[in-house]
Amino acid sequence: MDSGLPQEMFQYYDKGGEAGRLSGGAGELERLRTQDLILRHLPPPPLLVLDVGGAAGVHALWLAKRDYDVHLIDPVPGHVEQARAASDAQPSHRLGSATTGDARELWHADTSVDAVLILGPLYHLTERADRMRALEEAYRVLRPGGVVFAAAISRFASMMSGLAIPDLLDDPDFVEIIRQDLRDGQHRNPTEKRYFTTSFFHHPDELRAEMVAAGFADTKIAAVEGPAMWTGSFDADWADAGKRALILEFLRTTEEEPTIIGSGSHFLGIAHR
């Protein structure tokens, strides 16, 4: 059955880079900041956690090692295979399950899980109605008091990349991508160049509004990377243990500052049923 998801998204992820994307540099910053936010807002185990759009299982496997009962769902079969293999590689802390599925139609019963991670699906559901279905499904399966973590890509991510990375603004194709993103958040890559694939880039206020409209309470939006990754010295600073600690400290201090939230590539919506 046709999932309605863009075929170019599957082609992009079938290249296999997602499993290692969060292991170093800016990807590692994204991972550590996301996990810091999750750990500060997730009650201690035992809890049943649903990782919707969990890709190769980086966050799911991390939570499983902390004794959470984690079940991963992803629409990309290759991701599910990678997650299962990685789960088998940590036999004392396996995932509860890893299956293909759609964020808009979860098979879990009403009020049956304690937490839901949606750390990718909102990127690729380019229509608001589909994003609302995904958020409403998360709300449906959560128990009262359960927590949701919903990641979004910033409306300004391409622009910030263009300003920070040498030569990107020399590419007229990328300049047009920036202009389109800034107009309405509808990110498209009509080229064969390995820029990001079809997706929706949120303004922080849009993510908050969507989560509130889905019924969630106490919604807050927090920056993930903030402006740290755009500095010319980021790689060197990140490799220095002392400076890395300062980067993480300052990002935590400013994560809910409205003028900071949209400055990085990602931000995270955190709310409760």
Image (cartoon, helix red, strand yellow):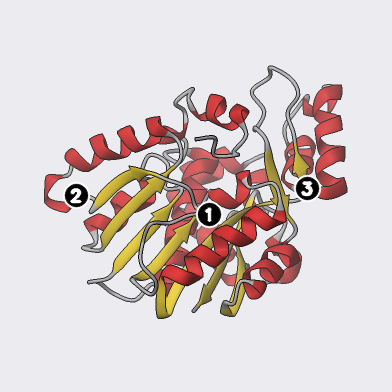
- 122 on left or right of 143: right
Q: Which residue is mark 3?
A: 185
* Mark 3 touches mark 2? (CB < 8 Å): no
Residue 168 seen in this snapshot: yes
Q: Which residue is mark 1?
A: 104
Mark 3 vs mark 1: which is more N-terminal? 1
Q: How packed is label 2: few (under 14 Cα within 10 Å), some, or many (20 or more)?
A: many
Amino acid type at circle 2 is: Arg
Viewer-nearest of discs 3 and 1: 1
Q: Residue at x 42, y 45 (%)?
A: 101
Q: Residue at x 27, y 70 (%)?
A: 47
Q: From the viewer's perspective, is 70 left or right of 102?
A: left
| CA–CA distance in space, label 3 to label 1 | 21 Å
Other residues around mark 1 within 10 Å, as few (<14) / some (14–19) / many (≥20): some
SS for callout 1: loop
Do we see residue 231 in this rendering? no
The crowding category of the residue bearing disc 3, from other C-alpha atoms within 10 Å (few below 14, some 14 to 19, many at least 20), is many
Measured along the vertical axis of the image, is residue 195 above or below residue 56? above
Between 199 and 36, which is closer to the camera in this rendering?
199
